[in-house]
Image: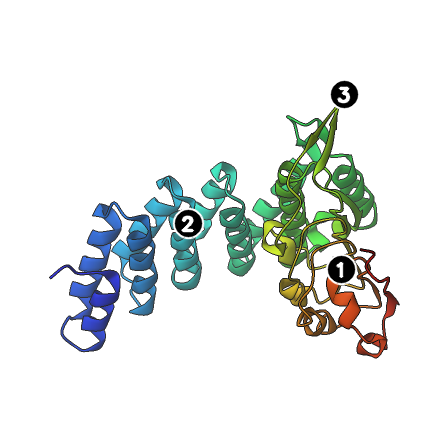
């Protein structure tokens, strides 16, 4: 019988495998399987059986630092964050300098916040200093980093580094890294900052890119999930997603501080999107003109919101 991660977990829960045997089998799958999903499930199941011996930490440390699969690196980093926070500083410090995957980097930064000592704070401060030195958000596209550099400089005239909490430092870094990845993905990712945090993001017409006298057309945004790291922009107040191909805005419910939302001229037709929008708690302005579901909407659905509600023209 082939032992899968799920089967090992079941056998452990049914007392057919002792804890050490289950750990050894899961580690064997992590180290020897050619199936990345099996490896990821094995790491997750180590967490489920509350595996905390020293060899588990070494395994996760090695995976986080050297594995070629970003999902496996991130899963291992999460396990270290949950169970080995007292040993996490050294590998997280190394990974912050060498990791390139966005999700891994965000998890590393959050782990440094959780460690919450002077050394982890110093690492975060150094990362802010590195942001100030970067000339470009995207060197290949020659998109400069002036906005973050200027905003951080202005902020530091009012406060010194020591006055920032771990969370405040991390938020600036996460906002910067989010805009780096969005700038690389979307040519026309326009944003404004306040206190080095993104409060306005414009991703309207992202398909249009001008190169000299030629024009290239890219695919519009079809799904909110394409906007990598959007939920990490927790200070975002204004979001413009007009003139795309979006059909569903369910994920915007997580944007608790959003006050202005522009989603005109998309492909939203399902009336269920009304409930998603109504669940954005602080929304005061909404532009949904040019979407099919406008025909089904009663203005009373958004009685506390300034509404731009223009019917479709066919």
Residue 71 - label: 2
Q: Position of residue 299 (x, y in %)?
A: 85, 75
Residue at 64 percent across and 54 percent down: it is 230
Label 1 sits on a secondary structure element that is loop
Real-space Cα distance between discs 3 and 1? 33 Å
Residue 31 position, x and y percent, is: 24, 47
Residue closer to the observer: 117 or 153: 153
Rendering coords of residue 84 (x, y %) = 39, 59
Check if mark 2's residue and mark 3's residue have beta carbons within 8 Å. Answer: no
Q: Nearer the viewer, residue 99 or 233?
A: 233
Q: Which residue is mark 1?
A: 291
Tell me which corner region of the image, top left, top right, bottom left or bottom right, holds residue 186: top right
Point out the residue furthest to the front here. 314
**Which residue is labeled 3 in the image?**
212
Q: Secondary structure at mark 2?
A: helix
Residue 32 placement, left or right of 280? left
Q: Nearer the viewer, mark 1 or mark 2?
A: 1
Query: Looking at the image, which residue is at 46% across and 42% down?
Result: 95
Q: Nearer the viewer, mark 3 or mark 1?
A: 1
Badge 3 marks a residue whose secondary structure is loop
- Between 238 and 307, the one nearer to me in the picture: 307
* Mark count: 3
């Amino acid at each position: 019988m082939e032992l899968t991660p799920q089967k090992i977990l079941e056998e452990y829960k049914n007392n057919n495998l002792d804890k050490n045997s289950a750990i050894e089998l899961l580690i064997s799958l992590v180290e020897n399987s050619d199936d990345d999903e099996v490896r990821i499930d094995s790491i997750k199941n180590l967490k489920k059986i509350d595996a905390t011996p020293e060899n588990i930490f070494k395994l996760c440390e090695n995976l986080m630092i050297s594995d070629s699969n970003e999902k496996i690196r991130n899963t291992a980093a999460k396990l270290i964050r949950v169970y080995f926070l007292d040993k996490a500083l050294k590998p997280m410090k190394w990974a912050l300098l060498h990791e390139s995957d966005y999700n891994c980097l965000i998890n590393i930064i959050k782990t440094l916040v959780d460690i919450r000592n002077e050394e982890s704070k110093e690492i975060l401060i150094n990362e802010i200093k590195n942001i100030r030195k970067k000339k470009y958000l995207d060197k290949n596209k020659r998109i400069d980093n002036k906005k973050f550099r200027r905003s951080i400089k202005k902020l530091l005239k009012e406060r010194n580094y020591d006055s920032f909490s771990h969370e405040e430092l991390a938020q600036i870094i996460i906002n910067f890294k989010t805009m780096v990845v969005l700038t690389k993905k979307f040519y026309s990712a326009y944003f404004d900052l306040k206190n080095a945090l993104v409060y306005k993001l414009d991703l309207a017409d992202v398909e249009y890119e001008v190169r000299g006298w030629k024009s290239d057309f890219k695919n519009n945004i079809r799904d909110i999930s394409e906007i990598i790291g959007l939920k990490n922009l927790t200070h975002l107040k204004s979001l413009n997603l007009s003139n795309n191909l979006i059909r569903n805005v369910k994920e915007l419910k997580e944007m608790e501080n959003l006050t202005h939302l522009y989603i005109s001229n998309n492909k939203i037709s399902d009336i269920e999107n009304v409930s998603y929008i109504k669940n954005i708690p602080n929304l005061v302005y909404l532009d949904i003109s040019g979407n099919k579901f406008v025909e089904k909407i009663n203005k009373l659905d958004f009685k506390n919101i300034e509404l731009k509600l223009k019917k479709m023209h066919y």
